[in-house]
Amino acid sequence: MESPCQAVAQLLVEARGNLDQLPPEARRHVASCSACAETAAFERRFASVVESALPPTDPGLEQLVLDHLPTYRLRRSLLAAVPVAASLAVITAGGVLAGGLPGGRLLGQVPMVAGHGWLHLLGAASDWSVALLAVTRTVGSVLPAFMPLAGSAVAVLGLASVVLAVRRWRPGVAWRRDD
Amino acid sequence: MVRPSDESLVALAVEGDQAAFTRLVRRYQRRLTAFLAQLVGDLELARELAQETFLRAWSALDRFDPRYKFSTWLFRIGHNLGIDHLRRRRISTVPLVREDADGEEIEVAVADLGKDPLEHFENRELARELRGAINELRPEYRELVLLRHFAGLSYQEIADFKSMPIGTVKNKLFRAHTVLRRALVSFL
């Protein structure tokens, strides 16, 4: 069981030795107990020493913060956009490497290919399994066989780069309660 | 003149009021710098980290949850920055084997930059003893002492910061003070 002195000592630590912050009963105990009176005196001295050990206010720091406030949010926003830009760059590079983005040649075929695909889909819309098969065939007829694989790989790479970049350049520290 | 609360200043700062945020900087910079100086072991570095902490807080204010105290959130950002810095720089630490209040041997590790975060403190001998006594605490006690005495957080704020029951905070700080008193009894 906790002794009265230990309970009072806990209160003294919490109050930094300031008797005014103790409940009346604890204050009376300190007045009649030399050990607790010593504890109170130590806590007051410790608090006082730590207080005087704090570094002085640095007006330069306040000014530095103030100077950077207008641009800081913008800079952080730009940094936050880096992973997105990196991901797009990787996807584009992957597409070019896979031969999927050769400029106008493929883009020029888009309307025709899209129309072709829609016709395939409309024709098979009454039956979902057939529709899915049609989608697969449509994709297969439009893209070379390695393209879906290359696309998947690029998507995974892009996602990985986003995750890595976000871990490296966190736009800010979100509130969290746990460590 | 009524001192505006943190909550009211934060509300203004969220709207982009830089003057309100500057008042928060003024209010917390000394405690934050002191806390970081003890954490990273270097006052100048602590000032840089304090600056970065305030700027990060400014840029993340729109994500601040007003159900919690601004001070706890600010010190959390500073603490994360300090720890990240120590990890990134792989600051060398000095392993010390000490006996804790229960007589058990414990190993503590403290940042060793060859610098003194209490360099501004005039009483050199007391500064050395104070730093030594704090550094020799168990890491879990040491952090609570820094949060209580250097950061100036209340027990409830520390409990929020550490996601720890307030009773545990009280017990650990009491034990930490028992150890500190034993170490500093001839100086204080």
Image (cartoon, coloured by chain):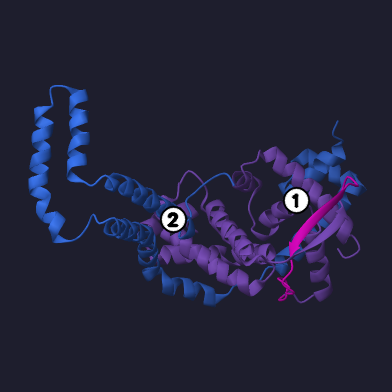
Q: Position of residue A33 (x, y in %)?
A: 90, 45
Looking at numbered disc 1 in the image, what kind of residue is underneath it? Tyr
Q: Colour of chain A?
A: blue
Q: Residue furthest front?
A: A145
- Res A163 seen here: yes
Looking at numbered disc 2 in the image, what kind of residue is underneath it? Val
- Chain ID, mark 2: A
Q: Secondary structure at mark 2?
A: helix
Q: Colour of chain B?
A: purple
Mark 2 highlights which residue? A166
Q: Decide whether residue B67 is among the magenta residues.
A: no
- Res B5 seen here: no
Quadrant in which residue A81 is drawn: bottom left
Q: Is residue A70 above or below residue A92?
A: below
Query: Which image quarter is the N terminus of chain A in?
Result: top right
Which label sits on residue B141?
1
> For the point 56% across and 71% down, which residue is it?
B48
Q: Main secondary structure of the magenta part?
A: loop
Quadrant in which residue A10 is drawn: top right
Magenta residues, start to end = B101-120
Q: Position of residue A48 (x, y in %)?
A: 75, 63
B99 vs B78, left or right, is right
